[in-house]
Image (cartoon, rainbow, N blue to C red):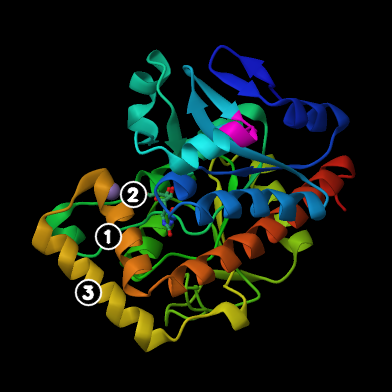
Amino acid sequence: MRQHDRYLTCSEEVSRGIRAGTPVVALESTIISHGMPYPRNLETALAVEEVVRRHGAIPATVAIAAGAFQVGLSQAQLQRLASSRDVVKASRRDLGLILAGGRIAATTVATTMIAAHRAGIRVFATGGTGGVHRGVEKSLDVSADLQELSRTPVAVVSAGVKSILDIPRTLEYLETMGVPVYGVGTDEFPAFYTRKSGVSVPARLDTAADLARALLAAWDFGLRAGALVANPIPDAAQLEHGYIAGLIDQAVAESERRGVTGRELTPFLLGRIVELTGGQSLEANIALVKNNAALAADIALELGRQSASPGA
Ligand code: PSU
Ligand code: MN
């Protein structure tokens, strides 16, 4: 694992963990800066790190500051990401500009994967990834997260994708790009706030050990893709399907009316959904991120075990 280079700095805790061979789980920061309101975003970021630690792995939240990826953030850095309005959302295409300057930037799923891979981290937990937007035939809006999943060998644990996106087309795109999608204990691709989407998962795996085996075999063979591990929201935290679907439709219609596009679109929709649900969606979001962090830690431990004893 690489702990430092000109463009990447690991925190003391992450460096120590890597040296000791402790499994590490990467966490993204756009969910903090653009995905949840302050101060719940900060509380959640800290709580999610705790979940990873409790499950025996080291959390490595990723952002960019002072011209380098920071892998493992201090409380002060998390506070800054959570509360400043001038944090930019950095996707792959933004990296040159941000690494050349000194600005603080939050990493998306795509750029967190890039940093994790460079640091030698194989598992990453988040809430939801980007995908193919509804109305793609007009906008051509496909999140760079999907391309990244096809080219960077990191497993991303998410609760599926929200229906702010076109779920069947997101899965078609992933198939085209050769990205494995594993439903965890489910035959149906989860839709973030709900366990069901009406769309089948291409493959179902029920345990962290099985997931680790499939991941390692693909990487050992030489495939460069990551994987989307789709872990349904815990039953007790689910929102009622009809209720959330109606509010998402409303948020999407508003974004169209206002002409919101490009990198602003996803944060706009996430923010509107929190407002329209009076914060109910936020509680569901927090529950599913913690659930994903726990599974990601279990997978990281299994990857460590199985790499130590090939064929296990
Ligand atoms: N979906 C969510 N919560 C999020 C995001 C997506 O439910 O916080 C964030 C992630 O950082 C993801 C990014 O990588 O939005 C995707 O943005 P875009 O659609 O602009 O690619
Ligand atoms: Mn987009």
Q: Which residue is mark 2?
A: 143
Nearest to viewer (mark 1 / mark 3): 3
Nearest to viewer (mark 2 / mark 3): 3
Label 3 sits on a secondary structure element that is helix
Magenta stretch: includes residue 236 = no
State the residue at coordinates (66%, 41%). 122
Q: Give how far across and how far down residue 296 sits, in percent.
A: 68, 54
Q: Amino acid at mark 3?
A: Gln
Q: Amino acid at mark 2?
A: Ser
Q: CA distance from mark 1 to mark 3?
A: 15 Å
Q: Are marks 2 and 3 in contact (CB under 8 Å)?
A: no
Magenta stretch: includes residue 74 = yes
Q: Is mark 1 within 8 Å of ligand 2?
A: yes
Q: Earlier in the sequence, mark 1 or mark 3?
A: 1
Say if residue 151 shows up in the picture.
no
Q: Is residue 99 above or below residue 38?
A: above
Q: Are marks 2 and 1 in contact (CB under 8 Å)?
A: yes
Residues shaded magenta: 71-76
Q: Is mark 2 within 8 Å of ligand 1?
A: yes
Q: CA distance from mark 2 to mark 1?
A: 8 Å
Q: Quadrant of the N terminus?
A: top right
What numbered label is drawn on residue 133? 1
Mark 3 nearby-residue class (10 Å; few <14, some 14–19, many ≥20): some
